[in-house]
Image (cartoon, grey):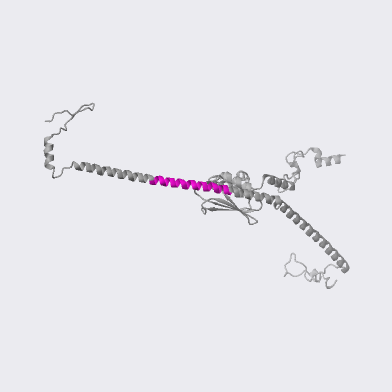
Amino acid sequence: PGPFPGLCPGWSPRAVPARGRKARQDPIAKSKAVRVKLPPPVDPEELLVVRERYRQHRLVLSALRAEFRAEMLQRKREERLAAEGSVEQLEEHRRLMAWNNEENARQQARREERLRKEEEEQKRKKLEISEKQARKMEAFLEEKEKEVLQLQEEAKNFITPENLEARIEECLDNPRNYNFAIDKDGRIVKRTVLS
Amino acid sequence: MPMKGRFPVRRTLQYLSQGDVVFKSSVKVMTVNYNTAGELSEGARKFVFFNIPQIQYKNPWVQIMLFRNMTPSPFLRFYLDNGEQVLVDVEDKTNKEITEHVKKILGKSKETLEKEERERKKLSHPATFGPKKYHLRECMCEIEGQVPCPAFVPLPKEMRGKYKAALKNEA
């Protein structure tokens, strides 16, 4: 046992035993004061052989693991591709997208129809309103016309300073009798005598 | 404890699991543009209120975004993973029509869903027993036709170790 370059196990003779009940700073037991712990003796040839065998074993194992891992990934990828990227699926997708576009076009047509109808409706309403307005104006004007004419008619019978005298004479000459009698049935009698 | 919201049935698992729109794996984002007022957006509003929870429950990895009062007419837009965008005009449609339309163009068909279900079932064998996470039953005593658990029904004398040992000692 001694340090061989490349074969040293990484140990060195320890003067202090491993921790236990005592702290690092506590004194060592009297019976252990001269104890020197040495690593277990190693046969170099055996070590070489065992190391080589372990190396090969681990190499083979990791290679196998990598192989299996790659196989699993490949299988998963193939599965995914087969499920998602096959030709029929793409075809199906295109067909569905085309159908969707058609549906959108139909909806567009319906919308345009609806908008057109609404526009027509609005125009019609506007026309109606303007017509009504025009009619109202006409009616109003007619009313006013009628009033003006009526006034003109009445103007002929107005009493002006010129024919005041004549009218007074006329009234005095023709006395009008405003008296009348009415009974409970609502019959009016205008034959009362003027006194 | 009072229920939350106007239609608390939307929060029940039974309602959510009744949603039948399962998107294909290429659909990543769903965007809904709709208006909060107006007759034409009524179907879209009902869709957002009643059907989107079901869709999100069935597709937890699809991002759903809602935009209100940004456009004059309502529409849906789907963003697929190959960059394609699918536009669906939903003006003047009822929410049922919208779900049917979406299911037809981007949903997994019933056969696909059934196939996936069967694949999933193949992974686990229903006859095995073990931890509850992976199996249906934990102990053999739970399986029909097997010896019941001695915790509930004592074993007959002949099966018990102490009886057999006593017999051996006698003999």
| Quarter of the image that includes the C terminus of chain B | top right
Residue A61 drawn above or below residue A31: above
Residue A10 drawn above or below residue A187: below
The question of residue A107 being in magenta is answered with yes
Going by the image, does A168 lie left or right of B99?
left
Percent x, y for residue A2? 84, 72
Percent x, y for residue B48? 56, 48
Going by the image, does A161 lie left or right of A41?
left
Residue A141 drawn above or below residue A33: above
Residue A194: image quadrant is: top left
Residue drawn 81% across the image and 38% down it: B158
Going by the image, does A134 lie left or right of B9?
left
Residue placed most toward the observer, B43 or B88? B88
Residue drawn 43% across the image and 45% down it: A124
The answer to whether residue B5 is visible is no
| Quarter of the image that includes the N terminus of chain B | top right
The question of residue A29 being in magenta is answered with no
Span highlighted in magenta in the image: A104-130
Residue B13: image quadrant is: top right
Percent x, y for residue A121? 46, 45
Residue placed most toward the observer, A190 or A46? A190
